[in-house]
Image (tube, rainbow, N blue to C red):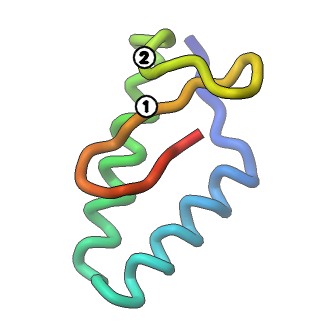
Amino acid sequence: MRLVWTEPAQRDLAFARAWIAQDRPLAAASQVQRIVDTVMGLRDFPNMGRPGRRGGVRELAVSGGPYRRV
């Protein structure tokens, strides 16, 4: 499976990192890496997660934070 990070997704990830870093700078990089690792798992396991509220979208839980990635 081919995985593409859209411009909005890249901006959202950068925003999340900056937002987390305001209170926990060291945790920000770690959380972003967990997000990237989880999302990249879709290349090998495209049905990972659950179907999203919109068609063609998967929702994935990422450990280590109370955030939802779509």
Q: Amino acid at mark 1?
A: Met
Relative depth, front residue between 20 and 8: 20
At mark 2, the secondary structure is loop
In this picture, is 27 found above or below 41?
below
Farthest bottom residue in view = 22
Q: Is residue 30 left or right of residue 4?
A: left
In this picture, is 37 found above or below 44?
below
Residue at left 72%, top 17%? 56
Q: How many marks?
A: 2
Location of residue 44 in the rendering, given as x and y in whole percent from the top left corner: 40, 12
Residue at left 58%, top 18%? 51
Quadrant hosting residue 37: top left
| Residue 40 - label | 1
Q: Nearer the viewer, mark 2 or mark 1?
A: 2
Relative depth, front residue between 3 and 38: 38
Location of residue 3 in the rendering, given as x and y in whole percent from the top left corner: 59, 26
Location of residue 65 in the rendering, given as x and y in whole percent from the top left corner: 31, 57
Q: Is residue 55 left or right of residue 14?
A: right
In this picture, is 11 found above or below 22?
above
Q: Residues within 10 Å of mark 2 (few under 14, many from 20)?
A: some
Q: Amino acid at mark 2?
A: Met
Relative depth, front residue between 48 and 44: 48
In this picture, is 36 found above or below 52?
below
The answer to which of marks 2 and 1 sits earlier in the sequence is 1
At mark 1, the secondary structure is helix
Give the residue at mark 2.
48
- The C terminus appears in which quarter of the rendering? top right
Quadrant hosting residue 6: top right
Residue at left 56%, top 67%? 14
Q: Residues within 10 Å of mark 1 (few under 14, many from 20)?
A: some
Residue at left 50%, top 12%? 46
Location of residue 17 in the rendering, given as x and y in whole percent from the top left corner: 46, 71
